Amino acid sequence: MTTNSKQKKRGLGRGLEAILQSPDTDITSADISGNYVAGAIAELEISKIEANPFQPRADFDDMALRELAASIKIQGVIQPVTVRKMGFDQYQLISGERRLRASVMAGLTTIPAFIRVANDEQMLEMALIENIHRENLNAIEIAISYQRLMDECALTQDKLSDQVGKNRTTISNYLRLLKLPPEVQIALRDGHISMGHARALISLENDEAQLLMLQKIIEGELNVRQVEALVRKHHNPDSKPLPAEKLVVPEKYRLAGDRLATILHTKVEVKRNSKGKGSLVLNFGNDQELERLINLILQNRS
């Protein structure tokens, strides 16, 4: 495969092809940083990234940075920083200074980064919107793309709604996912929980409660309705539980129960949950009927 074909495969569509064909683009196949194209994620050396002189935030909470650094040591950097290419193998931070500082504190020498080129805001916006409409993106990737459009292209949620063709509530729900603890974001990204699960967790008051509920979801294989019920119970311990979800027994098992009832001359109940677990209940009215059923079963075994 040629270098040019590799570059095209890494692009996000026609928007990035326009970037690569622009005379203002200084990212080329000869770039020492590894053939990176605008819109791609690269693992950059932190020493090659200079601070943003226009960073409006001057103070960073030291304790919060240490907590983030501890998380990064375990989970890595989930959301890449964004940098602008300033020259040959040199970059300037655009957004993500807190993540960059925490990564340094965690002892990292490289960090994942979105690369931009000078004067590319309109093309970046085009590429990100194209990227959002890919079918194989997970909820966290979509949320990050929405956040990047707002941060780097100066879009409000209303403007973003117009640009991507989604209603404002949908966009807001995605953006809220980025406030969840890294462990929850990773579980959502990797398909261990759904967006419905994640949205239920958002209403819990702190990371500890959210992580505890995440553990219950995974260990108990809980569906979204069950999690929503647990969250309501968490907020209002005195509330009455919702009625149990009615499960329909597949017809082949129901018919098998009917056949058993005919053979044993008693009522037979087949109970089964969504995971395939359940019970087979034989009804009897007195000890004599119980003895009869036991003898029938034992006789069939021999």
Image (tube, rainbow, N blue to C red):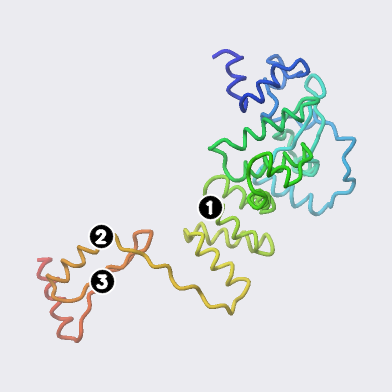
Q: Give the CA distance from mark 1 to mark 2.
A: 30 Å
On the image, numbered disc 2 is attached to which residue? 251
In the picture, which quadrant includes the N terminus? top right
| Image coordinates for residue 287, horizontal then vertical, percent | 18, 86
Q: Which mark is residue 193?
A: 1
Q: Is residue 57 above or below residue 253?
A: above
Q: Place residue 238 in its image quadrant.
A: bottom right
Kindly state the secondary structure of the residue where label 3 is placed.
Answer: strand
Identify the residue at horizontal 23%, vertical 58% (top origin): 252
Front position in the image: 123 or 1: 123
Q: Which comes sooner in the sequence, label 1 or label 2? A: 1
Kindly state the secondary structure of the residue where label 2 is placed.
Answer: helix
Is residue 259 in view? yes
| Image coordinates for residue 165, horizontal then vertical, percent | 63, 42
Q: Which comes sooner in the sequence, label 2 or label 3? A: 2
Q: Give the CA distance from mark 3 to mark 1.
A: 33 Å
Front position in the image: 47 or 53: 53
User: Crowding near pointer 1: few (<14 within 10 Å), some, many (20+)?
Assistant: many
Residue 27 lies left or right of residue 140; in this view the side is right
Q: Place residue 121 in its image quadrant.
A: top right
Which amino acid, by three-letter code, is at mark 1? Ile
Which amino acid, by three-letter code, is at mark 2? Glu
Residue 39 lies left or right of residue 222; in this view the side is right
In the picture, which quadrant includes the C terminus? bottom left
On the image, numbered disc 3 is attached to which residue? 269
